[in-house]
Amino acid sequence: KEQRETMLRFLIKNNRVSNEIIRNAIVSNFIGNKTLYSIKIFSIENEIKNGLYYEKKSYDTSSSSSSSSCVLFNNKKNHLRMNRYNFFKNNYLKNENKNESGGDGGGGARLNSKTVGNQIGLTITMGIVGLGFYGFYKYYQDQYFKEDNEEEEDINKGEETEEELMERDLDLSIEVLNQSEYYMKRNNTKEALELVGKAMKLLRHLNENKEYKDAVVVEYNLGRAYKSLGLIYSMKNDFENAENYLNLAMEIYGVDETLPEYAELFKIYGILYTKQGRFDEAEKALQIALNKTKELYPSNPYHPERLVIFQSLAELYHKPANKDLAKCKKYLKLIYVGFSNIFQSSSDRTPKHSLYIVLNKLINICEEEKNYKEAIEYCNTLLKEYRKTNISSIHPNIQKIYYHLYRLYKLDKDYNNMITTLNQLISIYEQAYDNVENSLVIELKADLAHTYYLLKEYETGLSILYQCRSSLESIYDGDDEDDVALKIKIDKYISWIEFITKNKT
């Protein structure tokens, strides 16, 4: 706390700081668990030398990617305004003594005298005179609301107009909504719900002033907040609240069917109805969304929004109570074509997980249909896609594909390809285990021997089984259930083939 206070005094007094100090002593605070906001103070021109230039950086700590946006506050006396303080105190800050959450723009941190140092950091970090300013002002008014020997009354000079305050509120509400969407994408409904609630307070206040020049923008973002709440409650399986908020969003967006949000709402309705088991309504809603996106993106039949709707329809037709494998496969194929088009133009060799997921779903659907040949085609396609990347030939995913291929060839009674696939799989496992004897490779060899038996190549099968029995003896553990089961399996195969070869007639 003392370090933060010292740093703040220095920053506000001097308006400049070295990069080293920025890195080591800058005031910062975590919003939730994953988003960090930090300040950078830069030297700026003399005519605005009393202003502060903030760079808001937001990034996922598990990712190297980040995004930034900048806001310039050019104030002659102090970037904290008395009227701003009064506005937020009267409208948004309640019962400070009970440690209620201050609207810190995302963190929901507590306001009291012990943690006000953190609140200062968070308030300045957000780059706005925002929710949570009450604690800052109360604790530090003597230090920061006076400049040299000037009287406190001088601070009121050059106050922001009501219009400027409303513009600031609108910018803040949009930024908070953006952050809520960040959390929704990561299934963090608690943080998302808190942020949307804060944005709603601002937007509803702005919406009361119908003469505000950006009233249309306010109403649009109010619809966006309702839509977000509908999504959040749908994720929480609170279907009643979800539908109520979606209906409120539809009242705003429904007046113009050409808006992308209009189509998006029907997509969300479809997902919600699917969860509730209202399959007919879900199908109608998703088809409306599909038709509207066709009108919105006529030149791109595989627009990302359409791919999401295809996915929702595929899931709808794969529900046990509404299963239609043909329709499910139809939409999965459309997704596959869409992803193929997207990745075809990409020259990088990084894994394309979304494409792999769709191919795996197609393989499983074809297997459910007992269309093994088509499932095998998709399996081979998946193998080719993996080989386009820098993935190791003995990667577990490669092993899974080969094993799935072996199973499909077995179901299709394609014994020759079974043998080829098993030999490849055995080679992969031997490399993975550095040719050390292990029960997994021995079992695969036993399956290979059984395949030769199915082809009536008894001597080849028997020769492999003798090798398996010898290899198992060197690692056999009588207390291991798997080893015991494998020994029984090998002995059974040997006994049966020996019996057949002696009694061919």
Image: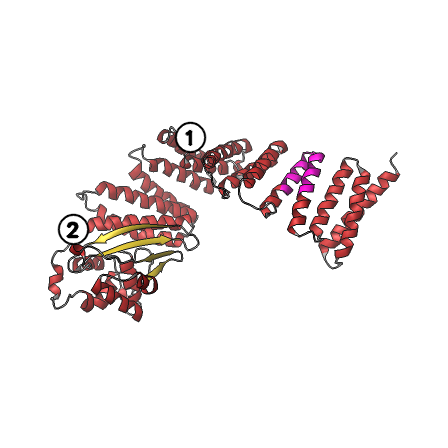
Quadrant (top left, top right, bottom left, bottom right) of the N terminus? bottom left
Q: Which mark is residue 162?
A: 2
Q: Confirm whether the magenta stretch covers residue 406.
A: yes
Q: Quadrant of the C terminus?
A: top right
Instruction: Report x, y in % for residue 459.
Output: 82, 40
Q: Is residue 438 above or below residue 25?
A: above
Q: Is residue 122 above or below residue 409?
A: below
Rendered residue at 11%/63% (across/down)? 153
Q: Secondary structure at mark 2?
A: helix
| Magenta stretch: helix, strand or loop mostly | helix
Q: CA distance from mark 1 to mark 2?
A: 46 Å
Where is residue 220? Give x, y as percent.
28, 41
Residue 325 seen in render: yes
Taking 480 as reference, is 207 above or below it?
A: above
Residue 380: horizontal and vertical position, in percent? 59, 36
Label 2 packing within 10 angstroms: few (<14), some (14-19), many (20+): few
Q: Position of residue 239 (x, y in %)?
A: 41, 45
Q: Which mark is residue 301?
A: 1
What span is in magenta? 402-424
Q: Quadrant of residue 133?
A: bottom left
**What residue sits 31% from the left and 32% below the top?**
258
